[in-house]
Amino acid sequence: RSLRLWDVLGVKFPEYFTKHPALLADYISNFETRPDDVFVVSYPKSGTTWVQEIVWQIYNKGAVSSVKQALRVPFLEMAATHEKLVELIHLKTLPSPRLIKSHLTYSTTPRSANKDDQCKYIYVARNPKDVAVSYFHFTDYLNLFGTDYNGPWEFFAKLFIEGNVVGYNVWNDHVLDWWKHRDDPNVLFLKYEDLHKDLPSHVQIIADFLNKPLSDELFSRIAKQCTLKGMQENMTSYTVDDKENTSALLRKGVVGDWKNYFTPELNERFDKEVLSKLKGTGLEFEFQM
Ligand code: PPS
């Protein structure tokens, strides 16, 4: 069984996001940003939950909240028209400053028509081999929502290369479109592997970008609370509903898990069809640590 996808504004979406793709398209196209919004954007499985938590804690003085992260930093595309979430999350009337998660492509992400009113976007990218493996594990969780995928890893990897996995098109297009805007003053482009290597410096980089000075105490507390272990201590905050597997958003959290899944043939195909597209762009990833 393969995954069923909608096409919304040229972006492939998992069917369980919405029963009304035209309404979702309308919601996204007409979404009005506010200058103090902060978007955490990524291709799925790239460290979104991690950066969402860092940003939320920076805005909330290092608090650890048992409130679901999905409510604290709502997911735009799900909050829009998902049959259950639409009742829980009212993004349009949420008080400022809004912290918003999205996986939208650069061109579909809402932004202000007025150049002086732009909000901030933090984009996080991860090496695509680990993204593919993480995404494959995520299908177990998505199956709970009726997004059928019960095929083998090899087939999933082929779908990933073609941009036909759970949603959001081809990985390299998504990442490169945002990479082109890495020097925009309202865009911060981060890499998962860099956060892994030095989380404290990245908490600082994010706080500086958001103009939120942190005391030394606060800064070390957030860095400690946002390690995988720190976040796992507050696991229930990262589940959306009771059916959900608690490890869906916080799984292994390492760099290099792909080595346990890639055959030499798949690795060669991936390098040829995915990584070769990054050549000459200046965007490089670490694949192990
Ligand atoms: S989603 O569903 O697209 O929002 O998923 P996303 O949050 O982008 O990615 C999930 C992966 O990020 C890992 N993760 C972390 N790694 C290290 N440290 C911390 N604190 C952390 N938080 C989340 C999570 O484990 C998923 O990766 P895998 O490889 O599946 O473990």
Image (tube, rainbow, N blue to C red):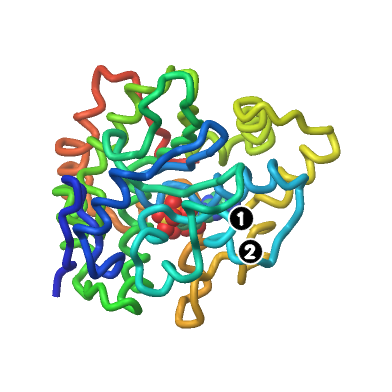
> Residue type at mark 1?
Leu
**On the image, which quarter does residue 75 sit in?**
bottom left
User: 203 above or below 225?
Assistant: above
User: 52 above or below 184?
Assistant: below
Tell me the element at label 1.
Answer: helix
Tell me the element at label 2.
Answer: helix
Q: Which residue is mark 2?
A: 232
Closer to us: 117 or 245? 117
What is the distance, in whole Å, between disc 2 and disc 1 at their CAs? 6 Å
Q: Which residue is mark 1?
A: 228
- Residue 39 badge: none
Residue at coordinates 53% horizontally, 34% vertically from top-left?
Answer: 194
Q: Position of residue 123 (x, y in %)?
A: 44, 36
The answer as to whether callout 1 falls within 8 Å of ligand 1 is: yes
Q: Position of residue 279 (x, y in %)?
A: 24, 22
Q: Position of residue 121 (x, y in %)?
A: 47, 33
Residue at coordinates 46% horizontally, 49% vertically from top-left?
Answer: 101
